[in-house]
Structure formats: C-alpha cells, structure tokens
Image: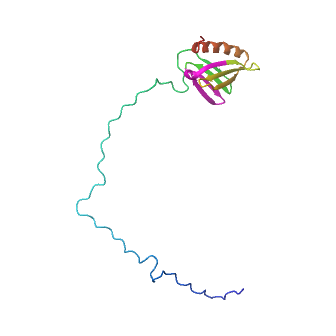
Amino acid sequence: MEQPEQGHRPPAPAQPWTPPGDRPGFGPPPPPYTPPAAPPGPPQPYAPPPQPYAPPQQPYGQPYPQQPPAGQVPLQGPEFMAVDRHNSVVVDGGGVAFEDHGVSVDFPWPEIRSVHYKASGNGKALMVAVIHVDGTFFECSVEARPRERLHQWFAHLAQVLGHYRPLG
C-alpha cells in the first residue's frame, strides 16, 4: 500500500447531481420577507374587556348527616379499647376499629353483620373478629399484659357490644 506524498491534494469531488433539464432540485430561492402593510385607522384592542365576576354560588347541601372526622368518636354510648404495643381494638358508637402494626381499618355499624371475640390459644391475647355484611372476615389480636387484664376486657367488651348489638 502506497502512502500519499506530503502536500498531495486529493482529487476534486465530482459536481453535485443535477436533475434532468439542468434545473436545480429545489428551484430558485424565495424572495426576501416583507412585513404586510398596517391597515389605516386606530389600533384594534386585543380582546374584549373582562366581565365582572359572578356572585358566589351558595354551597351545596350535605346529602347525608355529617360523620365525625376520622379519629374522633361520637360522645354518646360506652366505649371499649384494648391496646398493646402493636395492635388495638376500639368499639364505640361509630363501629369497630382495628389497628395492626400501624395499619388501621374502620367498620361502621351498618357494615357489620356480627362481632365475635375469644381468648387466644395460649390465653395471652384477646382475639376480635368482625364479619362484614358481604361475608368477609377481619380479625385483630391484642396481647393482654398482665393476663388478668384479659378477663377485664371480656367483661367490658361484652357490656359494650351488648349496648350496640343487643341480642334478640
């Protein structure tokens, strides 16, 4: 393979291709831009003036009785609360609430078919189950320390559930 000499120039490139008829491909350049002449007369406004604001609408009525904010319970009726370091069960006028390791769920009374409770197999925890009206089953377990607290919870829970869900 031969090396070109210093100062050697490559051959000139071929002329660009031209279409048949010796006319360039895109035609002649367009004429330079000239802005249109302004119409005589006063300048027109850009937009009509803004309209005044309409009077404020009245707020919509509440379709249902307002429920207390989340975390607040109605003041009427007895309450039951069982709490350990991870879980809790609350029964009050609003329904039943479970909290399991920071995740909470509320069951209003109209959505509850039944509530069941029992001691755990080792007798160290209260187990509460809610059966939803659609048949789904939810359960929460709360440790009772000391164990005597479990008997207190049973007595109190029976009284509170009897108030909100009387048998018969």
Q: Give the residue at x 72% y 15%.
A: 148
Viewed as shown, does residue 79 lie left or right of 36? right
109 inside magenta stretch = yes
66 inside magenta stretch = no
Instruction: Find residue 53 and report its image quarter.
Output: top left
Q: Is 16 drawn above or below residue 165 in the view shown?
A: below
* Closest to the observer, 73 or 140: 140
Display colour scheme = rainbow
Q: Residue furthest top?
A: 168
The secondary structure making up most of the magenta span is strand
Q: Position of residue 16 (x, y in %)?
A: 52, 81
Q: Give the residue at x 54% y 27%.
A: 70
Question: The C terminus appears in which quarter of the rendering?
Answer: top right
Q: Residue furthest left?
A: 41
Q: Give the residue at x 46% y 25%.
A: 64
Q: Is 45 drawn above or below residue 35 in the view shown?
A: above
Question: The N terminus appears in which quarter of the rendering?
Answer: bottom right
Q: Position of residue 103 (x, y in %)?
A: 63, 31
Instruction: Find residue 96 and report its image quarter.
Output: top right
Q: Residue furthest front?
A: 20
Q: Is 155 drawn above or below residue 67 in the view shown?
A: above
Viewed as shown, does residue 83 lie left or right of 75? right
Number of numbered labels in the structure image:
0
Q: Which residues are magenta?
A: 94-116
Q: Position of residue 147 (x, y in %)?
A: 73, 17
